[in-house]
């Protein structure tokens, strides 16, 4: 009996391409965050609610002190830098700033 490995190689290639595309979407974001999206973020929203609205952040950091767990997410667009900070999975602070555009 002879088994072909070709289907396994093709499947691995498909998975590799799919993973690359998913990574590319995460890094670049699915779309541009705009002022209207930013204004829709409300204090008390969950991380999942914000991610559903803005897409995944390009940068995220977290830390914990005792019972307090904090997360800071950042989205970069051509025009803005949007930062949302959470405490125990709830929005506590949001900022939007214009990006410096060189001469």
Image: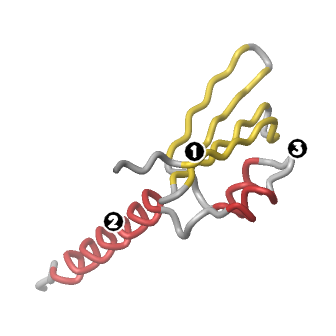
Camera-nearest residue between 23 and 79:
79
Residue at horizontal 80%, vertical 19%?
Answer: 67
Classed neighbour count for the residue bearing mark 3: other residues with Cα under 10 Å, few (<14), some (14–19), many (≥20): some
Residue 44, label in figure? 3
Location of mark 1 (residue): 74
Q: Residue furthest left?
A: 2
User: Label 1 to label 2, Cα distance in Å?
Assistant: 22 Å
Q: Nearer the viewer, mark 1 or mark 2?
A: 1
User: Label 3 to label 2, Cα distance in Å?
Assistant: 34 Å
User: Label 1 to label 3, Cα distance in Å?
Assistant: 18 Å
- Residue 96 in the image: x percent, y percent? 66, 46
The earlier-in-sequence mark between 1 and 3 is: 3
Q: Quadrant of the N terminus?
A: bottom left
Location of mark 2 (residue): 20
Up/down of 57 relative to 65, above or below: below
The earlier-in-sequence mark between 3 and 2 is: 2
- Secondary structure of the residue carrying tag 1 is strand
Q: Residue furthest front?
A: 103
Q: Nearer the viewer, mark 3 or mark 2?
A: 3
- Residue 5 in the image: x percent, y percent? 16, 78
Residue at horizontal 53%, vertical 69%?
Answer: 30
């Amino acid at each position: 009996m002879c088994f072909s490995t070709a289907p396994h190689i093709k499947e691995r290639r498909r998975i590799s391409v799919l993973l690359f595309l998913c990574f590319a979407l995460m890094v670049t974001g699915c779309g541009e965050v705009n002022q209207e999206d930013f204004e829709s973020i409300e204090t008390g929203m969950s991380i999942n609610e914000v991610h559903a609205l803005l897409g995944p952040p390009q940068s995220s950091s977290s830390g914990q002190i005792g019972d307090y767990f904090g997360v800071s997410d950042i989205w970069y667009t051509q025009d803005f830098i949007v930062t949302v900070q959470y405490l125990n999975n709830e929005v506590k602070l949001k900022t939007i700033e214009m990006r410096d555009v060189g001469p």
